[in-house]
Image (spheres, rainbow, N blue to C red):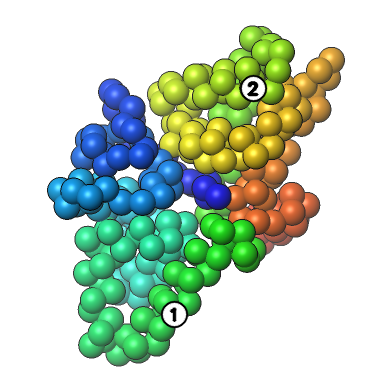
Amino acid sequence: MAKMRLKPTTPGKKDPKPSSAKGVGNDLPFDFLSIDELPDSSSEINAIGQRLDKVLTNSFLSRVPESEWTNARLDDFIFECIHEYGALALLSHRVIRRVLDWRFAPKGISKLEKLGRELAQAARIRRRLAKGSVGFRHVAAKENMVSELKRLQRALQNEWPETAESSIAFIRRTIGDHEVYPMLYTNKHALCDDFLHKYPTKALAFRGSDRIEMTAVQFFHEWLAHSENRTPESVRQDLSRIGRSNRRG
């Protein structure tokens, strides 16, 4: 199971191949979660780590101004990265450097113990042996993701592929435009090779018949539910609850 990425990477000129580290050192969108195993080459592994380090650093900076960086804020962020990326997050130089600091830091042993538990839980969720959680990061990503899904749905209806297979093929080609679909492009593997591959009729429901059978919001809930091994209704309720709480805050 491939988890949904909640932030696009910086767009560039070519599409790197998810199954290999070749090309990941540039500024292209890249679906890290499509990596099921690491390449043999140490230089290619290092390239993945450098690329992941850049993505995670940009994500951290977008939430916490550099003037407010603290080890506690970084530690919280690392556990969020483990939830999203699993053990792959340890390839980030920034992450592994801080994890090594925990060996001698106050409360560091308890953080290392938590790290082990979080790594195991991330693996369970990916293998569909446990349920994931829905948090503020999903609420924050929903607006942009749904906007791209609405654009994709209009294109799908205009093209009107006849079968589920041709609909999925059209979706794959269309979201290949990383300038128009930055978040869907980054999630191309998770969307096409995981979610729609397992549930091909969802592509037809998203296209609709004489009416819209599945809105972009409903599609987002279904996809996120699959990613976190949850039910669509529980995802909808959690997103609504967190959104209301955030507005009150």
Three-letter amino acid code at the position of disc 1: Lys
The answer to whether residue 238 shows anywhere in this view is yes
Three-letter amino acid code at the position of disc 2: Glu
The answer to whether residue 67 shows anywhere in this view is no
Question: Which residue of the protein is positioned furthest toward the top in this rendering?
Answer: 159
Image position of 198 with respect to 230: above or below: above
Please name whichever residue, 67 or 145, is drawn nearer the observer in this view of the structure. Answer: 145
Image position of 214 with respect to 154: above or below: below
Q: Tell me which residue sits at (69%, 44%) in the image.
A: 221
Report how far apart the C-alphas of labels 2 and 1 lie in the structure.
43 Å
Image position of 80 with respect to 171: above or below: below
Closest to the camera, between mark 2 and mark 1, is 2
Q: Position of residue 58 (x, y in %)?
A: 31, 49
**Tag 2, which secondary structure?**
helix
Q: Tell me which residue sits at (64%, 9%) in the image.
A: 159
Residue holding disc 2: 165
Work out which quarter of the rendered image holds the C terminus and state it: bottom right
Answer with the quarter of the image where residue 129 lies: bottom right
Nearest to N terminus: mark 2 or mark 1 = 1
Residue holding disc 1: 114
Please name whichever residue, 67 or 34, is drawn nearer the observer in this view of the structure. Answer: 34
